[in-house]
Image (cartoon, rainbow, N blue to C red):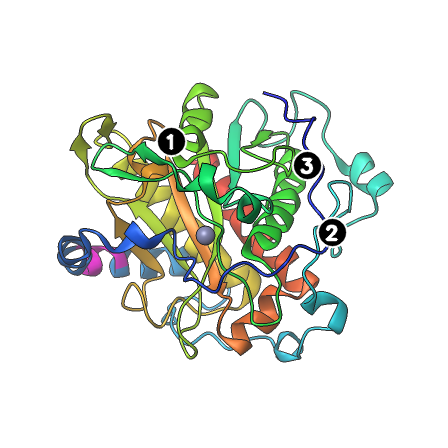
Amino acid sequence: MSYDSQPPASPTPPTPPRRLGRLGRLGRLGRGNVTVAVAALVPTALAGWLVWQAMSGPGDGEPPKVVPLPSQSRSAPSPADAKPSAPTPTSPPAATASPSETKKDQKPDGTGPLAGKVVVVDPGHNPGNFRHTREINKLVDVGTHRKECDTTGTSTNGGYTEASFTLDVSRRLRALLEQQGATVKLVQNEDRPYGPCVDERARIGNEAKADAVVSVHADGSAVGNRGFHVILPALVKDGAADTAKIVGPSRELGTRIAGKFVQATGSAPSNYVGDGTGLDVRKDLGGLNLSTVPKVFIECGNMRDPKDAALLTNEGWRQKAAQGIADGIGSYLKG
Ligand SMILES: [Zn+2]
């Protein structure tokens, strides 16, 4: 559906409200049960993590926690990075090739290790959401309950919005996957004034019959809370939601992404969610509950922590983040 009649998003949107962007206020519903589920899964997840680490190159046998951050990534972002900016759809990934080189490297249709695979990339939120609060606050059915259509997302203290971050990483991710021959669809590419709603985000992946779906986010948590985590769908069978068939493959997808994300970025798994595994399980997210294809979310870091924010606002780091996610998807799809 085209929304061309709407004006394009301003390149300097006002900073959204400083609400926590952690996937909406209703995100804590059922948390107690989820915590129990996570606790039950931790030994398995950690074992899987260590196996995966052992399989994945340098650092064999080393515990996944407390991976040192690259020193060059600790530097503060440049003023330009810190400003809210809507990346242009055509801007090439900074740490990869120029557009012409990208073209040259891109595999022709039907070739490449991911040829024939369909990946849907879901950039969380939408830079225009804050101008459409009535629409995005409308409740939609996510199976377990009704929740907001979408949220504005969070931002760094410097005003770099989560919506800008998710779009930038998602575009880099798309380029990397297409270079390997995958067919990639973005759920939104700043080509609509707001949304889509979380139920539609799930539907887009389902209708594409995606082999894998990744929803890209960054968290809005307390200072000192650092690192990334991947969110996996819980077993949910309620109303329109039935995740029975995707829980297993989604865990595999998420575990591989977490492992490759560590390798590519040097970031440690979250120190506040997932007990060091980099994995969380939730049953309150419509985008996961309503998915019929393997799907995970990734919270790439905490925008409200100054040290994480310095990474998230850095183009070079965002390219590494996209690379890590792409490597994880590729590993999952190649089996
Ligand atoms: Zn988010």
Q: Residue at x 21, y 60 (%)?
A: 42
Mark 1 vs mark 3, foreground winner is 1
Q: Quadrant of the C terminus?
A: top left
Ligand 1 is within 8 Å of the C-beta of the residue at disc 1: no
Q: Is residue 196 visible?
A: yes
Out of 75 and 335, give the one closest to the viewer: 75
Residue ID for mark 1: 199
Dot 1 and dot 3 residues touching (CB under 8 Å): no
Main secondary structure along the magenta-highlighted residues: helix
Crowding at label 2, few (<14), some or many (≥20) Cα neighbours within 10 Å?
few
Question: Against 68, is 23 above or below?
Answer: above
- Residue type at the position of mark 1: Asp
Q: Position of residue 263 (x, y in %)?
A: 52, 62
- CB contact under 8 Å: marks 3 and 2: no
Magenta-colored stretch includes residue 182: no
Between the C-alphas of marks 1 and 2, the distance is: 28 Å
Q: Position of residue 51 (x, y in %)?
A: 33, 57
Q: Which residues are magenta?
A: 41-45
Q: Which residue is mark 2?
A: 11
Please indicate, yes or no, whether residue 331 appears anywhere in the rendered image: no
Comes first in the chain, label 3 or label 2: 2
Rendering quarter of residue 113: top right
Mark 3, residue position:
179
Badge nearest the viewer, 1 or 2? 2
